Amino acid sequence: MRTTNKRVFYEFNSFVNFLKRNKKSIQVVRIKPPKLGSKNFGSVEVKVKRL
């Protein structure tokens, strides 16, 4: 089984909660804007440090 160190959040509240709990383990945050005409806010891609 392959483990990944990347998480994608489609709801901003979920990302904020993850950020509060895992601030020290986050390595990179990429904000992906929504596509034109979509009704969501886009997504947030988070890469965490490997343990």
Image (cartoon, grey):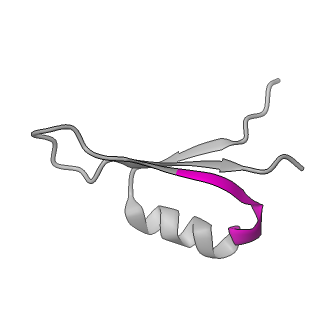
Indicate the position of residue 35 as horizontal and vertical percent values: 21, 38
Indicate the position of residue 47 as horizontal and vertical percent values: 65, 47
For this view, does 6 lie left or right of residue 9? Answer: right
Tell me where residue 34 sits by quadrant. Answer: top left
Please determine whether, in this image, residue 32 is positioned above or below residue 13.
above
Of 32 and 10, nearer the camera is 32
Indicate the position of residue 22 as horizontal and vertical percent values: 70, 67
Q: Residue furthest bottom?
A: 20
Task: Give yes or no for residue 42 being in the magenta stretch.
Answer: no
Please determine whether, in this image, residue 39 is positioned above or below residue 37.
below
For this view, does 49 lie left or right of residue 7? Answer: right
Total tally of numbered discs in the picture: 0
Write the residue at 90% across / 50% down: 51
Which span is picked out in magenta?
22-29
Q: Quadrant of the N terminus?
A: top right
Write the residue at 72% across / 41% down: 5
For this view, does 32 lie left or right of residue 27? Answer: left
Write the residue at 39% across / 50% down: 10
For this view, does 5 lie left or right of residue 51? Answer: left
Indicate the position of residue 19 as horizontal and vertical percent values: 60, 68
Q: Residue furthest right?
A: 51
Write the residue at 73% across / 35% down: 4
Q: Residue furthest top?
A: 1
Please determine whether, in this image, residue 17 is positioned above or below residue 25.
below
